[in-house]
Structures are given as C-alpha cells and as structure tokens.
Amino acid sequence: MSCAVKINGFITKLLKVDGQPSSIGGGFRDWADSPGNGPHDLGFSSSSPCCFRKLVGAEELRNFHPA
C-alpha cells in the first residue's frame, strides 16, 4: 500500500482597510511523497475573507435568507 504525504504552509495578516478590519493571506502546498500515478507538483492559494464588527447570533443565522 502506498500513500501520499502533503505539506501545507499558510500565512495571514489582519489589517484595517478604511477603518474596517480585513485579512489577507497566502500559502503553498507540495507533495513530499506520492505514488507514481498520485498527486504531485507545487500549488499556491490565497484568501481575503471579510471580517465584520457585529457579532451574529444563532437566531439571526437561522433567519438569514440570501437574496
């Protein structure tokens, strides 16, 4: 039996844009070991999630219906 071994690295930075908290980040992944027909090569990813000041409760989440 052979297996694949993945290595991940990711870094993020919290900052303010026009007074609003925001976050940006980036990372990579590589395969340390994998079978001949398995995954290989280096990959990159990025993120920029939204950070909101108002905390939302469980009741508000249940009643949320996107347009």
Image (spheres, rainbow, N blue to C red):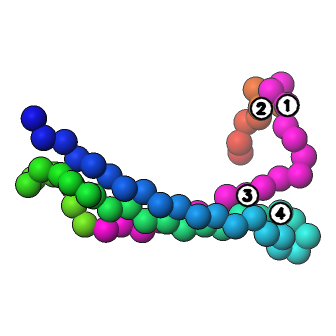
Circles 2 and 4 in contact, beta carbons < 8 Å: no
Please name the residue that numbered disc 3 is placed on. Answer: 50
Q: Tag 2: Cα neighbours inside 10 Å, few (<14), some, or many (≥20)?
A: few
Mark 4 or 3, which is nearer the eye?
A: 4
Please name the residue that numbered disc 1 is placed on. Answer: 57
Please name the residue that numbered disc 2 is placed on. Answer: 61
Does label 3 or label 1 sit earlier along the sequence?
A: 3
x and y percentages locating residue 26 in the rendered image:
54, 68
Instruction: Let me know if residue 58 is in the magenta part.
Output: yes
Magenta residues, start to end: 42-59
User: How far is mark 2 from mark 3, CA to CA?
Assistant: 16 Å
Q: Which mark is residue 21?
A: 4
Residue 51 visible to the viewer: yes
Looking at the rendered structure, the kind of residue marked 4 is: Pro
Circles 4 and 1 in contact, beta carbons < 8 Å: no
- Horizontal side of 60 relative to 31 (left or right) equals right
Q: Tag 1: Cα neighbours inside 10 Å, few (<14), some, or many (≥20)?
A: few
Mark 2 or 1, which is nearer the eye?
A: 1
Looking at the rendered structure, the kind of residue marked 2 is: Leu
Q: Residue furthest front?
A: 32
- Horizontal side of 11 relative to 27 (left or right) equals right
Does label 4 or label 3 sit earlier along the sequence?
A: 4
Circles 3 and 1 in contact, beta carbons < 8 Å: no
